[in-house]
Amino acid sequence: MNQSTRLKPLFHPGRLCITPAAHTALRGHGIPVISVVLQHVCGNWGDVLDDDRRQNDLSVETGLRVLSNYRLSDKSRIWVITEWDRSVTTILLPDEY
C-alpha cells in the first residue's frame, strides 16, 4: 500500500521572491523551488541550531520573522526568510543578506 505524507502548512508565506543566484543554485542541484517553500512553511527549518529551531517555532505562534537554512549537496546553503507580517518570503543565498 502506498501511503503519502500530508504536509500541513504552519503559516502563509505571503508573496514569494527568489534571488537569481538562489534560483540558479537550486536549479543546479535539481531542487524545485516549491519543495524548499513547502519545507519552510511546514516547519522543517533545515540545518539550524536547537535555539534557532525553538525561536522559529515561537515565531510561528507569535508572528515574528522565520528563517530556514538548507544545506545543498555541495555544502552551500540556501536561506528562506518569511517576514514577521507574513507579507513576503524570500529565498536567497546567505551572502546576499
Image (cartoon, rainbow, N blue to C red):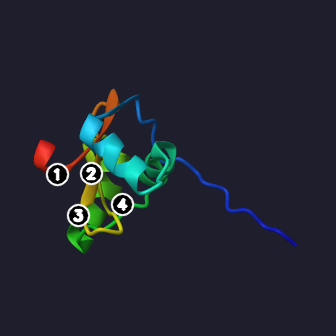
Residue linked to disc 1: 94
Q: Residues within 10 Å of mark 2 (few under 14, many from 20)?
A: many
- Residue extending furthest front? 28
Q: CA distance from mark 4 to mark 1?
A: 15 Å
Residue linked to disc 4: 45
11 to 1, vertically: above or below? above
Front disc: 2 or 4: 2
Amino acid identity at mark 3: Asp
Which label's residue is closer to the chain start, 1 or 2?
2
In the figure, residue 77 lies in which quadrant?
A: bottom left
Q: Secondary structure at mark 4?
A: loop
82 to 76, vertically: above or below? above
Instruction: Residue 10 in the image: state x and y as whole percent.
Output: 48, 48
Instruction: Residue 62 in the image: state x and y as whole percent.
Output: 31, 45
User: Where residue 79 is drawn, which disc sits there?
Assistant: 2
Instruction: Residue 26 in the image: state x and y as whole percent.
Output: 38, 50
Residue linked to disc 3: 52
Report if the CB atoms under discs 1 and 2 are less than 8 Å apart: yes
- Residue extending furthest right? 1
